[in-house]
Structure formats: C-alpha cells, structure tokens
Image (cartoon, helix red, strand yellow):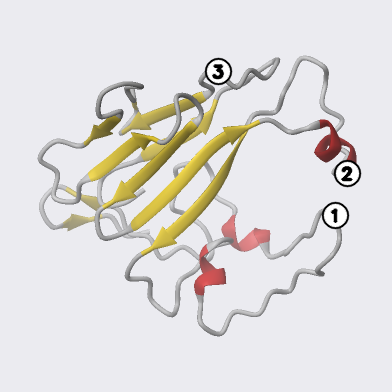
C-alpha cells in the first residue's frame, strides 16, 4: 500500500507444481492485471505521479516490481519441497504444493525509524533476536503487527497514513 493505491502480488493455490504453469497473480487497486509474456513483458501504471512497473523476469512465476522512489522487488512463486515440508513439519496434503512467494527487496529513502516485521531489520541499530541455526527461527513480537484485515494499516506499530484525493489524508 502506498498513497491511495494497493498492489497485490500473490501465489495461486496449486495442487501439483509445474514450472511452466504461471501461479502468479497481480492486482492493482483490486483489479486483476495481466503481465504479458512476450514483447516488453511488462505492465505499468498510466500517468501516475509515482510510476509502478511489473515486468516478467521469466516466462512464468517470476516478476520484478519497481515503485518509483520507493522500492524494487524481485518476486518468484515456488512450491514447498519435500525436504522443507519435513523440516518445518507443515504436513501438507498431497493435493497442495503450497505455492508461496520468495522475495528480495530493495527500499529507497527509508528513515532510521522504519518499522514492521521486515522493515525494522533495515534500521542501522538492528540486532536480531533470532536464534541462528535452528530450522524454523521465530522472532516474536507479532502482536505489534496484528491487523483486522490483510489491507488494513491499523496495528500497534503502524505509521502508514493512506492518502486520499488531493491532500486529504486518513489518519490511523
């Protein structure tokens, strides 16, 4: 979420994994968008103040997202493998490949007070509370980030203020 927009990149439910079948879904402000697989193989916002570009980096399941002045993300849909299923004790049923996103982020213009489960790791004074070397490390503190819904900016640690229209700001 940024300004008055919501960009959603998600993995579709997949019963059996096939590298050639696209399990990626992209939505802009609630509308599904199609990322072409040929030609320029990208989708971009039209006439927006802050341009957003979603480009394919492979024929299926992989995109790069650029939000001008905010972030660049490489996102890939991948299944949980047999080894990970055993290590993390997911106990996945045979009809669920548990497709999920692997992500790499690069943020621009972050403040030293950046917040969030991922965000606070970008603070210059961040020290991880995670015990290194365990199969499934847990950080804790999730109560600070619980929200009433997926797209809600309401939580104990939230600093996000969604902008509406021209200069109108919703305070949370």
Q: Position of residue 119 (x, y in %)?
A: 51, 65
Q: Quadrant of the C terminus?
A: bottom left
| Between discs 3 and 1, the one toward the N terminus | 3
At 48% across and 34% down in the image, what residue appears? 62
On the image, which quarter does residue 8 sit in?
top left
**Mark 1, secondary structure of its residue:** loop
At 32% across and 48% down in the image, what residue appears? 66
Q: How far is the residue under mark 3 from the one under mark 1? A: 30 Å
Please give the residue where the numbered disc 2 appears in the rendered image.
87
Residue 125 or 170: which is nearer the viewer? 125
Discs 2, 1 touching: Cβ within 8 Å: yes
At 64% across and 19% down in the image, what residue appears? 14
| Between discs 2 and 1, the one toward the N terminus | 2
Q: Position of residue 55 (x, y in %)?
A: 34, 36
Please give the residue where the numbered disc 1 appears in the rendered image.
135
Against 172, is 5 above or below?
above
Q: Which mark is residue 20?
A: 3
């Amino acid at each position: 979420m940024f300004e008055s927009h919501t960009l959603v990149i998600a993995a579709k439910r997949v019963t059996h994994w096939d590298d050639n079948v696209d399990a990626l879904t992209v939505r802009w402000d609630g509308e599904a968008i199609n990322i072409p697989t040929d030609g320029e193989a990208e989708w971009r916002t039209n006439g927006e103040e802050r341009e957003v570009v979603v480009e394919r980096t492979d024929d299926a399941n992989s995109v790069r997202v650029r939000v001008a002045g905010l972030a660049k993300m490489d996102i890939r849909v991948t299944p949980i493998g047999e080894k990970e299923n055993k290590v993390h004790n997911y106990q996945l049923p045979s009809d669920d490949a548990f497709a999920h996103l692997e992500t790499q982020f690069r943020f621009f213009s972050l403040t030293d007070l950046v917040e969030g489960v991922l965000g606070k790791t970008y603070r210059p004074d961040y020290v991880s509370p995670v015990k290194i070397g365990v199969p499934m490390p847990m950080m804790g503190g999730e109560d600070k980030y619980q929200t009433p819904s997926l797209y809600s900016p309401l939580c104990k640690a939230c600093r996000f203020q969604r902008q509406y229209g021209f200069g109108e700001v919703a305070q949370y």
